[in-house]
Image (cartoon, rainbow, N blue to C red):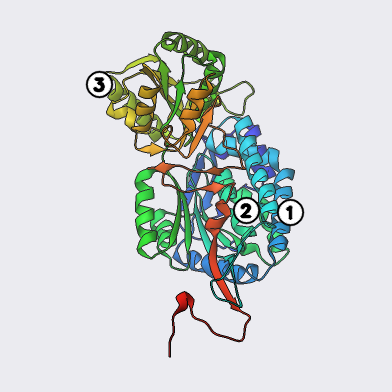
Amino acid sequence: MTLASAAPKALSILRSLGLEGPQSGAYAGRWLPTGGPSLAVHDPATGARLGEVRQAGPADYEAVVSAAQAAFLRLREMPAPKRGELVRRIGNALRERKQELGALVTLEMGKILPEGLGEVQEAIDIADFAVGQSRMLYGLSMHSERPGHSMKEQWHPLGLVGIISAFNFPAAVWAWNSMLALVCGDACIWKPSPKAPLTAIAMTKVCAPVLEAEGLGAAFSLLIGSNEEIGERLVGDRRVPLVSFTGSTAVGRQVAQKVAGRLGRSILELGGNNAIVVSDRADLDMVVRATLFGAVGTAGQRCTTTRRLLVHTRVFAEVERRLRQAYAQVKIGNPLEPGVLCGPLIDARAVEAMQATLAQARAQGAEVVYGGEVLRLSGAEAGGHFVRPALVRARHDLPVVQHETFAPILYLIEVQDLDQALAFHNEVPQGLSSAIFTADVREAERFLSAAGSDCGIANVNIGTSGAEIGGAFGGEKDTGGGRESGSDSWKAYMRRQTNTVNWSRDLPLAQGIQFG
């Protein structure tokens, strides 16, 4: 199916954002005449061809890095509140195009329209956060051990920031990094997933005019190309002191090793195998609502997707019954259509991976108690990658349970008490997001304690998905340890400098050393 035969709604979305015809895969203050291999983009809900991107090559890479470096040299001299003003205007530009951009996220990636709009709202929210942060890049003053001396610590712009994002959040992850990086005085080079390049182009087209008006368009540069031509260069480039990578743990390890090998910095947002602990004192209505969104939203393709449900034995049967009932009411179909709660997986490979995982689960003794089938929808959706979300009753120690599958599979695991729940919860290699549902304050506080959840995010009576901008986002163990978005995450995009000033007429040495 070609673009010409795509639904009128899809065509309208593409036209509104200037995405008709072949698109350049490189932006460096201007769109470069890229001549690399053509990348076809398809709608995962229909199989229709949405567009074409001419990928960047080595020459384009060098042009982008050079332009971004020049932009950085100007940005670092600009007062931080002035940089914040640029981000404020960028946020307003995104506000004006929220509807079209949100629809594009849905069209290209497959999450339902409310989630697509919510993702663009995330980009707007982090821009608002960054504006405030631009006036709060705080250092410290310290007392010197030497008389007539003062000490302080300050933060300076770092340089170029490479942002490698994943398909499942094609707008928000870039925004989390780029908005903070810009107020910190850095220039960004974005390599988006080849599975969602049109969103990256559209976001760049919306934001670029704000920067171009100041001669700083290359501060938000873009490179769409293969891992061999672009990704490996970006990761290995000493001119890029920080690389922020979002993706699988396996690839993240490679990125971390290569960046560390040149003594660069990395922010890693990798796998999640997130669990909700359900106490026998939990509000089960809340449990079902939170689990349904956490496990089925984005068709299970979030790093914060709920993948394990650790349920107290006293309420296990009732929770399973309620979930089966809730899952049966989930409408599956084109994510642009009202009422649909579960859209397609990103591609055929994702469907195959889900089916392989379910086969492994059965072979290891687990029982699929609901769903899991590949769906063949009629009409335009016949070419889409649809599945029915699965509920799987399993033991905690099955190898398949320890592994993250990027699909809507929820493992139901019975536990005897909170001690056992915490042991099962923490035994997996990943450590991103977690939650407990309970009305017992002692259980809640224990879950949040040092002896509780070992994840970077731990919630009480709220699910694993839906990170808020104000808090630092990221996890531990195989999740990579990186932090983005709120709190003091801005420090990752700056370099720390300690200053000592001698305002006396003497030159005493530290530690009382006498020399000469």
Left or right of 276? Residue 290 is: right
- Which comes before the other along the chain, label 1 or label 3? 1
**Is residue 314 at least partly visible in the picture?**
yes
Q: Which residue is mark 2?
A: 179
Foreground residue among 142 and 4:
142
Q: Amino acid at mark 2?
A: Met
Residue 295, above or below 215: above
**Is residue 384 at least partly visible in the picture?**
no
Foreground residue among 431 and 24:
431
Residue 182, above or below 456: below
Q: Position of residue 170 (x, y in %)?
A: 54, 43
Q: Position of residue 98 (x, y in %)?
A: 69, 41
Identify which residue is drawn at 35% across, 26% down: 355
Q: Which residue is mark 1?
A: 89
Q: Which residue is mark 3?
A: 363
Q: Residues within 10 Å of mark 3 (few under 14, many from 20)?
A: few
- Which quarter of the picture shows residue 141? bottom right
Measure how far apart labels 1 and 3 are at the Cα level. 55 Å
